[in-house]
Image: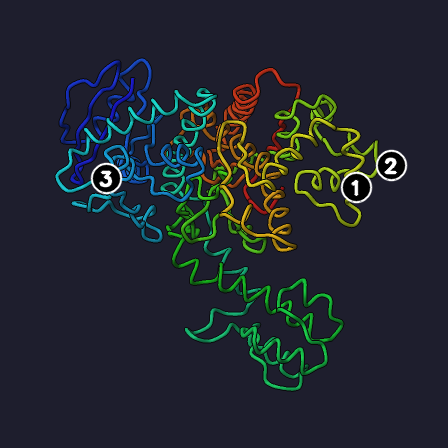
Amino acid sequence: MRIAVVADGEGGGWLQELEHAPGPVRRVPDLADAARRAEDERPEPPRWVWSASEDVYPDLVRAGVRVARCHDVALTEALLLGYHARHGEAHSLGAAWARLHGLPVPDDPVRPLGEGIAAQPALFEADRSTLPPGTDRLAALVEVHDDQLRRLAELPHPQRMRLLTAVESAGGLAAAEMSHDGLPWRPDVHDEVLTELLGPRPHTGQRPAVLAELAERISRTVGREVNPDSPAQVLRAMAWIGHPVESTRSWVLERVDHPVIPLLLRYKELSRLYSANGWTWLDTWVRERPGPRGERLGRFHPDYVVGGVVSGRWATRGGGALQIPRAVRSAVRSDPGWALVRADAGQLEPRVLAAVSGDDALAAAAAEDDLYARMAAHVGGDRERAKIGMLSAMYGQTSGDAAPLLRTMRRLYPRALEYVDQAARTGENGGIVRSWLGRTSPAPQGWATTVSGPDGDRRRRAHGRFTRNFVVQATAAEWALVLLAALRQRLPSLPEGAGIVFFVHDEVVLHVPRERVEETLAAVADAETRTRTTLFGDTPVRFPLDTVVTDDYAKR
């Protein structure tokens, strides 16, 4: 059963059941209560149809309602447009409805930074569906949903694309839940780390003590005043000391032999920490509350963007959740009496390549816990060289030590290498490629036929490397989405705030009471099995999860 839902901005809304034909429209004064009843009282939870999860679901989550399934019109529209190489076109409900009616397509609404973590819902919030004023929003929603189901059915592999839209929509649900629950974060530990590395918290507008001292030492070593925060001044200083460089990137500076280089590199490292995850970040993104024994407990509330990257990986609107630096990871601590369960899919991309290419030899290697150790037998027992060879195959690296290793990979795993080679040729010729379920790469912007000479060749090769990796990375992103969706279905009933609290590429982190750890581990194992069989059927390829139970995210 599918139920179309439109919120009224005042806590209520309109519902319409969609079976073989739309049923009567029902007005409900309490949308959260209606959703809770539908989830609890039906033999099978409905699939909710709404304009966008980030518009509707956060209010339900704040009211204590978690739904099992949904059809997110905005996410589905983006996938369908992308399938036909129309990336970047507006994909809101209003945009989809306008295209159906041959009307001017409105831009997608701009979502303010951090909106997904707002403490309280805004009543009488402006309608962000971008439909024309006076349009029946529920009728428009049902019409666009019907059109999307029709377009999905017309695709060459409709079942795969239906699965992709389902797990992408499930990702929207998980993103709202994780944003609300937050990642456990100890503000006191974070503050201790910053103080140890940077010195006491500085006054506004001043450098931390350690950075100030480094800046003075840099100037003394160079022999003239240098502001290390100014790339232009650093470049002039490097020329002044007789070591001109083309940029201030770390890898460029590391090639220079001069006493100032370690100081500049240390300054860059600590300055990056201060600006990206310093005290201001802590004040902005972590909500603090006292613990049972007076501890400073908190929650980091990221604002996720599902499918924010063309490969299907997620992004965030501020906060940097997908790049938590090693220096502050020790601040991610479980609450007293609780535990963090980390599930990390190691060597995911080469295992995905083995499954999608049907290469029996690579599948045999991927049947082992350590795929690279199995490969190492063919390159003198050197596991690291085996890893370099496989990554070179997927990323298109052909220079240096990679060249002979790549030849070995072609000999050992011909079907796997042909799979990515074909994707690269397609990209070089200006074509598009697709993931296992149908996510589509963007088409090159005209240069494939209009740019000639060395520059054109360089661009074509670069796009070929992109499409070579896209078919693997995008499928790996789908694997992670299916795992996330399967985990949501298989986790045991847990207390409020427990469950999935963090997701990044190929890692999921759960926060659960200590006494529920064994149940959670069983659910994770079951979800991995379901993910493998859902995507690839009876494949010999294994996707082992490195699962760790800890109270400190920085510890393995």
- Identify the amino acid type marked 1: Arg
Mark positioned earlier in the residue sequence (1 or 3): 3
Left/right of residue 412 with respect to residue 42 in the rendered view: right
For label 2, the crowd category at 10 Å Cα-Cα, with few meaning under 14, some 14 to 19 and many 20 or more, is: few
- Residue 216: which quarter of the image? bottom right
| Residue 17 percent coordinates (x, y) | 22, 20
Q: Do residues under tags 2 and 3 come within 8 Å of each other at their CB atoms?
A: no
**Pointer 1: what residue?**
385
Mark 2 to mark 3: distance in Å?
A: 64 Å
Q: Around disc 3, counting alpha carbons within 10 Å, would you say few (fewer than 14), some (14 to 19), or many (20 or more)?
A: few
Q: Residue at x 70, y 32 (%)?
A: 417
The quarter of the picture where residue 414 lies is: top right
Task: Identify which amino acid the numbered label 3 is placed on.
Answer: Leu
Q: What amino acid type is highlighted by mark number 2? A: Gly
Q: Looking at the image, is mark 1 or mark 2 earlier in the sequence? A: 2
In-front residue for pair 108/104: 104
Horizontally, residue 552 falls left or right of residue 541, namely left
Looking at the rendered image, the disc whose residue lies closer to the viewer, 2 or 3, is 3
Asked if residue 215 is positioned above or below residue 336 in the image, the reply reads: below
Q: Which quarter of the rendering shows the N terminus?
A: top left
The residue at which mark 3 appears reads as 103
At 60% from the left and 52% from the top, the residue drawn is: 452
N-term-proximal mark, 2 vs 3: 3
Q: Position of residue 506 (x, y in %)?
A: 56, 37
Kindly identify the residue that appears in the image at 47 percent across and 25 percent down.
486
Give the secondary structure at mark 1: helix
Disc 2 marks which residue? Answer: 380
Q: How many marks?
A: 3
Where residue 14 appears, as percent x and y from the top left, is 17, 29
Marks 1 and 2 in Cβ contact (< 8 Å): yes
